[in-house]
Amino acid sequence: MSALPAPHFTDQTHHLPVRIYYEDTDFSGLVYHASYLRFMERGRTEYLRLSGIGHSALLQGDTPLAFAVRRMQIDFIRPARIDDILDVQTRFTEARGARIFAHQQIVTGADVLISAEVQIACIGLDGKPKRLPKALRDQLAPFLHGN
């Protein structure tokens, strides 16, 4: 079995390779639907990490911040199976106010398995929305799809 490639950006799309393990599947041998949510969360986290934004640093800043999924619309198109290698593709399309908008796909080869539109809220430790700081918006700007 070959090693997975490292997470990387191609233009403004972040790619996170994920191998499917037995633990990711359900009784039928197909990937359990909630596993895709974990894969997409990892994709968003690695996107931020490679763009220079770490969750730990956000929490330890002068004004501690975190991100929470506010809304997600998902189309489950095709199933993945054990030992498949998936490419979790993440594009942040806009960052404004207290929100970041993203489009995510999970693909294998040329097949799109999952497509999702995601709205992410920037929140304080009290759980209330917080406007994205200018420095954070500026740091994200070069990575936003369409810029």
Image (spheres, grey):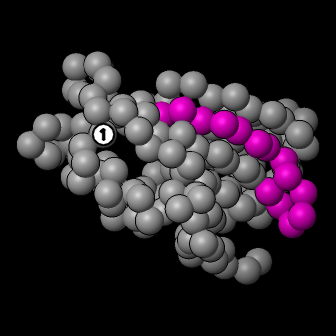
Q: Residue at x 73, y 80 (%)?
A: 2
Indicate yes or no whether the magenta region holds residue 110.
yes
Q: Residue at x 39, y 57 (%)?
A: 140
Q: Which residue is mark 1?
A: 132
Q: Secondary structure at mark 1?
A: loop
- Quick one: which residue is furthest to the front in this view? 147
Q: Is residue 130 visible?
A: yes
Rendering quarter of residue 36: top right
Q: Residue at x 80, y 57 (%)?
A: 107
Where 71 sits versus 2, above or below? above
Q: Residues within 10 Å of mark 1 (few under 14, many from 20)?
A: some
Where 68 sits versus 145, above or below? above
Which contiguous range is marked in magenta? 107-120
In the depicted view, which residue is nearer to us: 110 or 42? Answer: 110
Q: Which SS does the magenta portion mostly show?
A: strand
Name the kind of residue labelled 1 in the image.
Answer: Leu
